[in-house]
């Protein structure tokens, strides 16, 4: 039987304590294994959170940034218009801006 992160000596120690002690096994026997198991679980949890956050960024944040970039590029294209067209465009969109 293989236990990830647990040395052969620690496994033998735990097995020997479980075989020889009849009524009570000191909790200190399991401390090293518990600490190693917690380290493995913490690392697995951190890896999961990193992958989940990366997927969140791809699915939510990237589309929002793409929309912002398209709005910025549209605004830049508008600034290239002649003055009278910009004036007309801004005059018609001002009431919409005031309602927000």
Image (tube, rainbow, N blue to C red):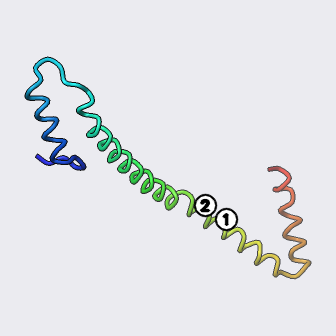
Cα–Cα span, label 1 and label 2: 6 Å
Nearer-the-camera pick, 87 or 41: 41
Q: What element carries label 2?
A: helix
- Residue 75 spot, x, y in % from top left: 76, 72
- Give how far across and how far down residue 35 sits, in percent: 32, 40
Front residue of 74 and 24: 24
Answer with the quarter of the image where residue 94 lies: bottom right
Q: Residue at label 2?
A: 64
Q: Looking at the image, which is closer to me, 67 or 13?
A: 13
Which residue is located at x 72 percent, y 73 percent?
Answer: 74
Q: Residues within 10 Å of mark 1 (few under 14, many from 20)?
A: few
User: Mark 1 and 2 residues: CB-CB less than 8 Å, in contact?
Assistant: yes
Residue 90 on image: x %, y %: 86, 67
Q: Could you tell me which residue is drawn at 52 percent across and 59 percent down?
A: 57
| Left or right position of 57 against 65 | left
Q: How crowded is mark 2: few (under 14 residues within 10 Å), some or many (20 or more)?
A: few
Pointer 1: what residue?
A: 68
């Amino acid at each position: 039987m293989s236990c990830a992160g647990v040395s052969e000596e620690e496994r033998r120690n735990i097995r020997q304590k479980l075989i020889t002690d009849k009524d009570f096994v000191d909790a200190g026997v399991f401390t090293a294994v518990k600490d190693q198991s917690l380290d493995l679980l913490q690392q697995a949890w951190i890896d999961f959170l990193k992958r989940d956050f990366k997927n969140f960024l791809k699915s939510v944040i990237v589309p929002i940034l793409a929309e912002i970039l398209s709005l910025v590029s549209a605004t830049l294209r508008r600034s290239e218009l002649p003055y009278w067209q910009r004036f007309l465009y801004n005059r018609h969109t001002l009431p919409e801006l005031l309602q927000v």
